[in-house]
């Protein structure tokens, strides 16, 4: 029996993971799940799936739910403590980490140190200290399989190459981006509303990642994630705008050959692959119809109109504490934008101001990444106030 733990079961990734586990048949079971505060979704999932464990991150929601926990389900403590316990359960075969933001750092580290098979949809920890987390994974013989469609594509293209040979064999990684809702559209971005930023043309995602996609920060974060997952220098990662979202990414090898992973834009495919790796099972996603596929377009990203991508790529090159600070500053700036405190175009301004206060040459540690995250959040909150709407 494969026992699957899903961190973030009420989000888009989590719900699709539930569907994938159900489709995989009687040899698979949702063993534990967590939500932030969506008790309605939690109640429905508990009735349907009957897992052994559940966690609610937000304390007030946890306190409300504590009085109605179904028989046979153990409710874990609120906050990070519950996520960490859930991620390291002895009985768990696979841990899917799809919580949003840096809050996923501690549960990812716990799953690594519990030697788990980890399906990773939470890129922020890999941005904060990915190289160190990969060393921990090697030490504890944990396996990290990326869930996001582009890192998953690269992971699949590199199949058969030993991890220590990636840099020697790879000439370039072609990291694709849909471009989000505003790429190629005329008009100023300063008047963009949160509702507009959340309307992604291809994917159904949570608020934070939807805004990151609109600013192209998400692709910058993925570039850092890929740099760390595969021990590749930042200069080997090239971002391409690909509006059709059919070629999810490609790898050019040293002999000039290019391998690409292509499929319909449906997250069910990479989610299921991350759960079942190294095996492949029949997917709920529709197959790609090449006859109907009229064209594939690729464009160079516009870093002047979307400066968040440039900031992220620069942080990838500089390394050290810069990626962790970038990630934290961006999380705060995005939340301020969603709440109406700053404009869409202020997001990169806030991030740049925080990065300007970072020192080069500081050696990063796992504990230090958490400290930098806290420091950068404070500085980003202060910077955001000066960019308030008038």
Image (cartoon, rainbow, N blue to C red):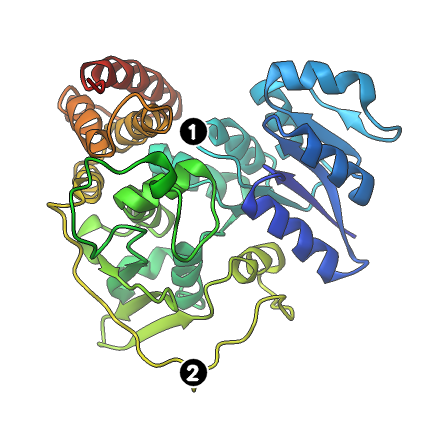
Relative to 386, is 135 above or below? below
Q: Camera-side residue: 214 or 117?
A: 214
Q: Position of residue 333 (x, y in %)?
A: 29, 26
Q: Quadrant of the C terminus?
A: top left
Q: Position of residue 73 (x, y in %)?
A: 82, 30
Q: Position of residue 139 (x, y in %)?
A: 49, 39
Q: Residues within 10 Å of mark 1 (few under 14, many from 20)?
A: many
* Residue that mark 1 sits on: 102
Relative to 381, is 360 above or below? below
- Does residue 88 appear in the picture of this structure? no
Q: Residue at x 75, y 24 (%)?
A: 75
| 319 to the left or right of 76 | left
| 20 to the left or right of 352 | right
Marks 1 and 2, Cα distance to the nearest angstrom?
40 Å
Q: Quadrant of residue 356?
A: top left
| 276 to the left or right of 374 | right
Helix, strand or loop at mark 2 = loop
Q: How many marks?
A: 2
Q: Quadrant of residue 172?
A: bottom left
Instruction: Tell me, yes or no, whether the two marked residues, 1 and 2, touch with CB atoms within 8 Å.
Output: no
- Image mark for residue 292: 2
């Amino acid at each position: 029996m494969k026992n699957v733990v899903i961190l973030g079961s009420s989000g888009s990734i989590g719900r699709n993971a539930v569907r994938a586990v159900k489709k995989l048949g009687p040899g698979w079971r949702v063993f534990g799940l967590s939500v932030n505060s969506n008790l309605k979704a939690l109640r429905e999932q508990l009735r349907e799936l009957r897992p052994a464990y559940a966690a609610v991150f937000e304390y007030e929601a946890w306190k409300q739910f504590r009085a109605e926990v179904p028989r046979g389900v153990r409710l874990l403590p609120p906050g990070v403590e519950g996520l960490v316990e859930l991620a390291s359960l002895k009985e768990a075969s696979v841990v899917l980490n799809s919580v949003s933001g840096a809050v996923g750092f501690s549960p990812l580290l716990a799953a690594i140190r519990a030697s788990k098979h980890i399906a990773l949809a939470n890129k922020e920890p890999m941005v904060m200290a990915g190289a160190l987390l990969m060393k921990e994974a090697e030490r504890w013989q944990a396996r990290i399989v990326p869930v996001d469609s582009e890192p998953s594509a690269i992971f699949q293209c590199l199949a058969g190459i030993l991890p220590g040979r990636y840099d020697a064999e790879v000439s370039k990684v072609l990291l694709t981006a849909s471009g989000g809702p505003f790429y190629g559209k005329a008009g100023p971005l300063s008047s963009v509303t949160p509702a507009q930023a959340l309307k992604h043309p291809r994917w159904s995602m949570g608020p934070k990642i939807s805004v990151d996609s609109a600013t192209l920060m998400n692709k910058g974060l993925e570039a850092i994630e890929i740099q760390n997952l595969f021990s590749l220098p930042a200069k080997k990662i090239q971002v391409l705008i690909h509006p059709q979202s059919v070629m999810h990414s490609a790898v050019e090898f040293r002999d000039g050959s290019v391998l690409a992973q292509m499929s319909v834009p449906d997250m069910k495919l990479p989610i299921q692959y991350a759960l079942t790796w190294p095996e492949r099972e029949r997917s709920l996603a529709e197959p790609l119809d090449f006859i109907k596929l009229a064209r594939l377009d690729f464009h160079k990203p516009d870093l002047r109109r979307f400066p968040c991508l440039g900031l992220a790529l620069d942080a990838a090159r500089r390394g050290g504490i810069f990626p962790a600070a970038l990630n934290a500053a961006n999380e705060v700036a995005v939340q301020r934008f969603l709440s109406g405190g700053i404009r869409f175009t202020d997001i990169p301004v806030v991030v740049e101001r925080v990065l300007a206060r970072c020192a080069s040459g500081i050696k990063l540690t796992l504990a230090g990444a958490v400290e930098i995250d806290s420091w950068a959040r404070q500085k980003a909150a202060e910077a955001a106030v000066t960019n308030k709407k008038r």
